[in-house]
Image: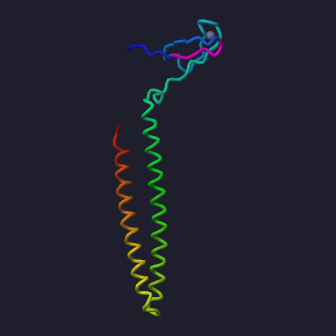
Amino acid sequence: MSEIKVTFRCDGCDAMLSFPSTDAGTVQDCPKCGGWVDVPEVTRREKAPPWKNLHDELNARYFEENVRQQVEIGRQIEVAWDQLKQAGERHEREASLLAREEEGLDRALRLLERFERLTDRFEALIAKWKRPA
Ligand SMILES: [Zn+2]
């Protein structure tokens, strides 16, 4: 196994130091100035290419936006449904409300279609996320 080095700068003398990764997380003496130095921990995250973090961040934002849109459309469906219900209650009394009821039904159906399209996109996104990189 090849030895992995941890490279960092000494806080005391500003020299670039290199220690074996087995020293990570320990306190060592700086070979240049003799002061104490904290050998930093090696994390996998630091090895990830920078574009990957950006990609994940953009995915997270897109994900959040999808959730937000679904919540909003869900709310609109509720409102449309309420209007439809109210129109239905008045239908017995006023035949002229029939047109409005149909309008409400149309709107509810259109919202429902939009909601289903969003859900499909959302599910595709989740599937993409679940797939191992
Ligand atoms: Zn030093």
Image quadrant of ligand 1?
Answer: top right
User: Residue shown at 60%/18% (left/top)?
Assistant: 38
User: Residue shown at 55%/12% (left/top)?
Assistant: 17
Residue 45: x and y in percent read 47, 30
User: Residue shown at 38%/58% (left/top)?
Assistant: 119
Residue 123: x and y in percent read 36, 54
Nearer to us in this view, 94 or 35: 94
Residue 76: x and y in percent read 47, 68
Range of residues picked out in magenta: 7-12
Seen in the picture, residue 3 relative to 93 is either above or below; the reply is above
Q: Is residue 31 left or right of residue 121?
A: right
User: Residue shown at 49%/14% (left/top)?
Assistant: 20
Residue 6: x and y in percent read 50, 17
Is 11 magenta? The answer is yes
Seen in the picture, residue 77 relative to 13 is either above or below; the reply is below
For the C terminus, the image quarter is top left
Nearer to us in this view, 109 or 5: 109
Seen in the picture, residue 120 relative to 17 is either above or below; the reply is below
For the N terminus, the image quarter is top left
**Label tally:** 0
Seen in the picture, residue 122 relative to 39 is either above or below; the reply is below
